[in-house]
Image (tube, rainbow, N blue to C red):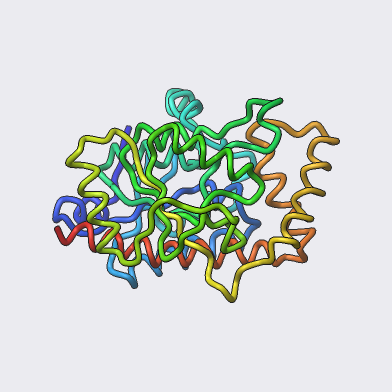
Amino acid sequence: MLIVAPEVADALNAGRPVVALESTIISHGMPYPRNVETAREVERIVRENGAVPATIAVLDGRMRVGLDDDTLERLGQAQGIAKLSRRDLPVILGRGGDGATTVSATMIIAHLAGIRIFVTGGIGGVHRGAERTFDISADLQELARTPVAVICAGAKSILDLPKTLEFLETSGVPVIGYGTDEFPAFYCRSSGLALPHRCDTPAEVASVLRTQQVLGYPGGTVIANPIPVPDALSIGEIDAAIARALGEAEAEGIQGKDVTPYLLARLVELTGGRSLEANIALVKHNAKVGSRIAGALAAD
């Protein structure tokens, strides 16, 4: 049921750094062909920074860890491919189906394969209006129980960021600002929300992760890495676009796991494509930082 690509398996067996990558960003996060181009570029950046990329997906009822170019193309062009969270994973596997993995499902499979570092764009969290809808991403509970470190540009700006941080704190998940004292807001470098912990080098992060393992913590860690300055959007612009997109989503009755892909796509339209370019830039930056953290962790 778990198929690990030979390159990834060899690296894990030899103790070399490996970085897990999700596949939802390919199938649900960006339009074709930018999705496949970005996936290939992110894998190149991981290699360039000394680690082996392991893009994760479910194909033909098998958990795949490490994908070739043809498979990335298949994911990029697939229509109606399932979006897999923890809830969906056993169902799609049991039925022999295909699916792109979200943060939570990617963490589960990465842990099964023995990968400790996972790079993504932004984690899911508590949705705006969750006091009415109870819409909270499974990513947060996964972070509380699966020991994989997630390098991200904070949580997606479309979410309720204060409540997301409160949920993580209650769940005992360390949130560490990488070179920042504030929680990044995906497209924006700052949310105005202070973080209790900060690390400035890969070696510092690796030391925290080793200590977490020694303490026997069951969960993961959020490494919040801000989008580079030249690629960041202004808070005012993105907040106005999000407010409009949220109103439209509610008016159209869009709910559950369909909300995030709808909002991300609508933001691309409302920002004239700038949100897509920012998304791509932050993922690439996270890949660079995450690969260096993986290298420092493997150097132990």
Residue 42 in picture, x, y percent from top left: 45, 64
Residue 128 in picture, x, y percent from top left: 68, 38
Q: Quadrant of residue 235?
A: bottom right
Residue in the foreground of this view, choosing between 132 and 18: 132
Q: Residue at x 46, y 60 (%)?
A: 181
Please give left or right for residue 215 compared with residue 152 in the image: left
Please give left or right for residue 56 compared with residue 9 in the image: right
Q: Quadrant of residue 146?
A: top left
Report if residue 71 is visible in the image.
no
Q: Name the quarter where the N terminus is drawn.
A: top left
Q: Residue at x 35, y 41 (%)?
A: 220
Report if residue 205 is visible in the image.
yes
Q: Name the quarter where the C terminus is drawn.
A: bottom left
266 in relation to 89, above or below: below
Residue 282 in picture, x, y percent from top left: 53, 64
How many marks overall? 0
47 in relation to 116, above or below: below
Q: Residue at x 69, y 66 (%)?
A: 234
Residue 238 in picture, x, y percent from top left: 72, 58
Identify the residue at the far bottom of this view. Answer: 230
